[in-house]
Amino acid sequence: AGGAVAAAGSIVVTGPATEAGTLYIYISGELVTVPVASADSATVIGDAIESAINSDINLAVTASNAAGTVTVTCKAKGTYGNFITIESNLGFGEETPAGVSLALTDLTGGATDPDIDDALTGTNLNQEWFTGLAHAYSGIAANLDKLSVYNGIGNTQTGLYDNLVFRPFQSAIGDVTAGSGGFTAIKALADARKTDRTNGAVSVPGSPNHPAEIAAEYLAIVETLGASDSGSGVSDTVGQILVDVLPGSTADRWTDDYDSRDAAVKFGSAPTIYEDGVVKLQNAVTFYHPDSVADENNGYRFRANISKVWNIGNAFKVNFSQDRWKGVVIVADVSLAADNDKARDVDAVIADLVALTNSFESFGWIFQGEYSKDNLTVTLRVTGTGFDTDYPVILSGVGGIMNSQILFDTSFAALLA
């Protein structure tokens, strides 16, 4: 964008080193190791830091040393860089060599993001059907609004949810704001977006990793578990590990509290827990939580349910796009049109719907196939141009809660009665 500014931070080295060792520097959670020799000056150590950072092409920054002050600059301009952290000694046993100290300043000052309008215009309408979108505009309401409108707001057949298009996507932002203030901030963002079924957040409060990296990994898991060809049906993300994502400190993690995690799921931020030395996902959700929709009827809350709806919709589209449904003639009874293999009647449509229902039930996308079979309707269009179908389904549940009560006694009376 015109006038955009790259964020910058710094690593200020004090020396000389009085022993050999290694610096363990983390750029947005990515480890950079820098060897240090005894008697190395601040300038020499700064040069080594510059070289180590610049040689790692996967880092989002470049480095430039001047007499032990290493300026770290984001490769991309805009606010993306303002979420890049610089930390040290995050791993077990890591320490700075004697005689050396590091003053670390996170990147700031990034300004002016590009407008995403150009990516959301034209007649393409997600022709390639990208189903997951991670981006760097964490919490920027204007861009979240544009994505939501383009995809389709609320429970409506608009945007990419239009029944003539039906190529919707889901998007997510990462959230690393720490402590109770972080919980309050993400809740405020979510509560301003109650009809947004496109966006949602994943919260790892206090994590040094970049929010966009966290969101990308989260969506990759969601997409893999939700794909119709996953081989094991659709499942939720509970217990899935965010690989190489580091947790915040205990004081930072509002997600350690069950009530806070439960509230976050309901307003649209997927919480995480730090367990067994790794960051694990809980339920994957969107911001969608209109006041007028009861929790038990909120089909757009859980991303697993959205995946089921997409898979069902795509299965309909694929089935009725087959050659056997192209160029058909509509008759009252196909048995009376035996000489025309393109003849189709209402019962032919119903037969396909029943077969589809059986497959949906087999995949575990729906709770019960019988309900759909008993309540579906197929009617002829009065113009004779096709069929109108109403196909109700009750999606399978998104499990994970086992609310058990153990009753005990010390008396043998019940046994001896």
Image (tube, rainbow, N blue to C red):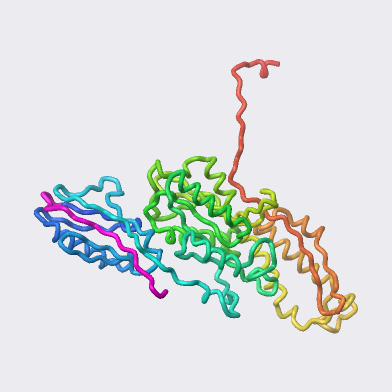
**In the rendered image, which quarter is residue 413 located in?**
top right
Q: Split into 4 quadrants, where in the image is the N terminus?
A: bottom left
Q: Is residue 231 left or right of residue 13?
A: right
Figure check: 242 above or below 131: above
Q: Is residue 61 above or below residue 252?
A: below
**Residue 31, how many percent across, how many down?**
30, 57
Residue at x 55%, y 74% (from the top left corner): 120
Magenta segment: 1-20
Q: Position of residue 220 (x, y in %)?
A: 49, 62
Q: Position of residue 312 (x, y in %)?
A: 67, 64
232 left or right, relative to 203: right
Instruction: Please count the marks in the image.
Output: 0
Comparing 81 with 92, the one in front is: 81
Q: Quadrant of the C terminus?
A: top right
Residue 358 vs 269, above or below: the answer is: below
Where residue 242 sits, quadrant-wise, is bottom left
* Identity of the residue drawn at 53% across and 54% down: 189
Q: Does the magenta portion include 297?
A: no
Residue found at the very far left of the displayed protein: 39
Residue 144 lies in quadrant = bottom right
Q: Residue at x 19, y 55 (%)?
A: 13
In this rendering, position of residue 383 left or right of residue 31: right
Depth check, front residue: 117 or 29:
117
The picture places residue 273, in percent across and down from the top left corner, at 46, 46
